[in-house]
Amino acid sequence: MTINDDVLILGSGIAALQLASLLNKDLNVRILTKAKIRTANSYLAQGGIAAAIGEHDHPNKHIADTFEAGRYHNNQEAVEQIIHAAPRLIKFISEQGSVFDKNQDGELLLGMEGAHSEKRIVHGGGDATGKNVVEYLIGTLKENVTVEEEVFAYELLLNSEKRCIGVKAKMPDGTQKNYYSRNTILATGGCGQLFTYTSNAETVSGDGIAMAYLAGAEVVDMEFIQFHPTLLYLNGETKGLISEAVRGEGAVLVTEDGTPIMEGVHPLKDLGPRHVVSQKIYEYLKNGYKVYLDISKIENFKQRFPSITAICEDNGLQLSDGRIPVAPGSHFLMGGIKTDLFGRTSIKGLFAIGEAACTGLHGANRLASNSLLEGLYMGEKLSNWLNQTQQVEFLGTAFSRPYTPQEKVILPDLQEIKDTMMERVGIIRNEANLRNQKVWLDSFNVCQINNLELYSIEEMTKIFMLINANLITEAALKRTESRGGHFRSDYPVEDEHYWLNKTINHKNSRGMESNHEYIETALAT
């Protein structure tokens, strides 16, 4: 078998590009993206990157805020290592050019966002941080990196030794292709498109998580979904993200008559943790009220937030009234493919970084602006490991499962998947709704499909969404408490016996078992 690549990266967000840009020139690197290189969630990120670099700030404060937002479900080692690395990562990029916003003295401008105790958010282009950083990273890619767009990867290739050796993919014209690699990295993002209202790019449907799960990799914490409190909400539809930085600059959530809705709800009011603010807005909307962001006290709003201004004006909303109608929508997945701090999964040769992975940094609810930071850190960390690790010489042939003839599954409408997930497994959950959703999802039995190549790209996307939906629903049923992004109206408080059963794991043994000893060794080193 011919090995095509030393490193095969699926996805083109900040984690993927950071990794690719830092790999040695003697490594043959290929990036596959299902759409275009600039359509990842990272490119859309309005919020910034958190780092304790202010005069009165300290990494220990940032660590404390991360634990508090994550409701102490976080992995302590991940939190400490990533937060302490943040100032160095920001300093390095800042020195490369005009990526981040600075004052007249050349000092980085620092903003405030929800659940932070200090101003520590670095922005680029006002509210275009993701775009600025992605463009910078694309510009640093070396000649050893090949980018292929519009390639839909749908199955991991494993050899007889249970090692990942690449992926199967489908091209836009329907033809299939196998990509072989010594190291396969999933940087495919979360699964925000599972819900009716979302801030996520249209491509974010949980493909990498589903592929890893079907191959036998461990997946954890899928019940923890962060719903961003403020998406532009017009005529029953969400139109785009209104960054938390707007509230950081003084915007207030109000009803139509101007009543502030966060008074007395949380000590930080409008800058409380995202799950608290989202639940309160959702409560008002369910009771027939409209909720607005009052931006009237923010000076030079259009100059400070040019991207948000464009989103509003492109959708016919003029900002002269000083109000933006908002609703919460799915924004970030705290769980994902279980990894150590090098990105290693429970399958040899398979790595995961970015939102597709779960390092434990975010716990039960991500602290604002920690996600781009995690992407930069994990991309760098994995690049160091790959650069210093002797590459395997021979991978063997792909393991072939014995296929049995199957009729194609009749899949539900895409909107039905989104609507049922939003209604039954969304911001507020309960046992009855979760069980109804589980019965509905089980009726499709998508995990038993063994002839994926017979399905179109659109159909495979639905299959992957249904797999993720099942993982989330099952985990939400098992967690009989409320914590962070997981809120059960029938179990509305945090369970005092929580530490006895901290993490809910998922493992699928379709075709081959995963190597449990490897993940234990990896996590211990």
Image: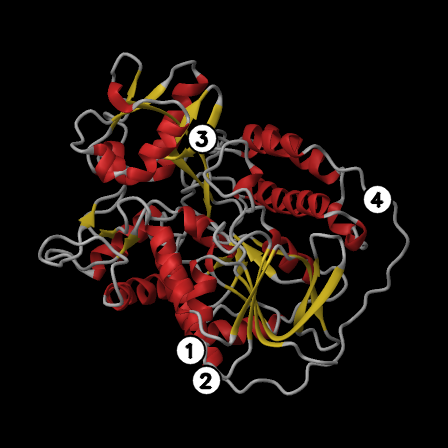
Please name the residue that numbered disc 1 is placed on: 384
User: Are the residues tagged 3 and 4 within 8 Å (C-beta)?
Assistant: no
| Disc 2/disc 3 C-alpha distance (Å) | 45 Å
Closer to the camera, 378 or 225? 378
Q: Quadrant of residue 219?
A: bottom right
Q: Is residue 300 left or right of residue 230?
A: left
Upstream in sequence: badge 1 or badge 4 = 1
At x 10% / y 58%, what residue is drawn? 55
Helix or strand or loop: what does disc 2 sit on?
helix
Upstream in sequence: badge 2 or badge 3 = 3
Whether residue 168 is visible: yes
User: Are the residues tagged 4 and 2 within 8 Å (C-beta)?
Assistant: no
Please name the residue that numbered disc 3 is placed on: 239
Which label was assigned to residue 388? 2
Q: Amino acid at mark 1?
A: Asn
Upstream in sequence: badge 4 or badge 2 = 2
Quadrant containing the N terminus in the rendered view: bottom right
Please name the residue that numbered disc 4 is placed on: 408
Whether residue 271 is visible: no
Q: Quadrant of residue 234?
A: top left
